Amino acid sequence: MKPEEKYEHIFKCISEICFDYFLSTKTQELLEVNINNTFSQLIDEVVEERNQ
């Protein structure tokens, strides 16, 4: 491999790692929000049932 190709390959690998990290981080954040919303909704339903 020529030096330019090596650098290009290294940049491509770093870019892919960053993209994967971003996606996994974003997915994790969205899952956390979804879980929190679901539990909040369940708690609200239980409280409402007990109050009736």
Image (cartoon, helix red, strand yellow):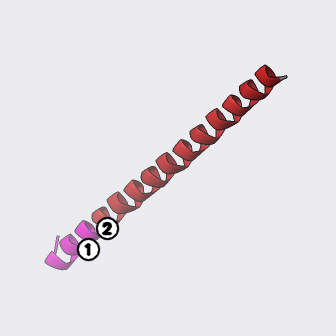
Q: How far from the left and from the top, in percent, is residue 9?
A: 26, 68
Q: Is residue 20 left or right of residue 40?
A: left
Q: Main secondary structure of the magenta part?
A: helix
- Check the image and report above or below for 31 versus 52: below
Q: Is residue 19 left or right of residue 52?
A: left
Which residue is disc 2 drawn over? 12
Q: How far from the left and from the top, in percent, is residue 15?
A: 34, 66
Q: Is residue 4 magenta?
A: yes
Which residue is disc 1 drawn over? 8
- Check the image and report above or below for 35 versus 14: above
- Check the image and report above or below for 28 versus 13: above
Q: Compare residues 36 and 22 and report the one nearer the observer.
A: 36
Please report the residue visible at 20 percent of the width from the left and 73 percent of the height from the top.
7
Task: State the image quarter where residue 2 is shown.
Answer: bottom left
Q: Residue furthest front?
A: 51
Q: Compare residues 25 and 7 and report the one nearer the observer.
A: 25
User: Mark 2 and 1 residues: CB-CB less than 8 Å, in contact?
Assistant: yes
C-alpha span from label 2 to label 1: 6 Å
Task: State the image quarter where residue 6 is shown.
Answer: bottom left
At label 2, which amino acid type do we have?
Lys
Please report the residue visible at 19 percent of the width from the left and 79 percent of the height from the top.
4
Q: Name the element at disc 1.
A: helix
Task: State the image quarter where residue 44 is shown.
Answer: top right
Region of the chain picked out in magenta, as a range: 1-12
Q: Residue furthest right?
A: 52
Q: Compare residues 12 and 40 and report the one nearer the observer.
A: 40
Please report the residue visible at 14 percent of the width from the left and 76 percent of the height from the top.
3
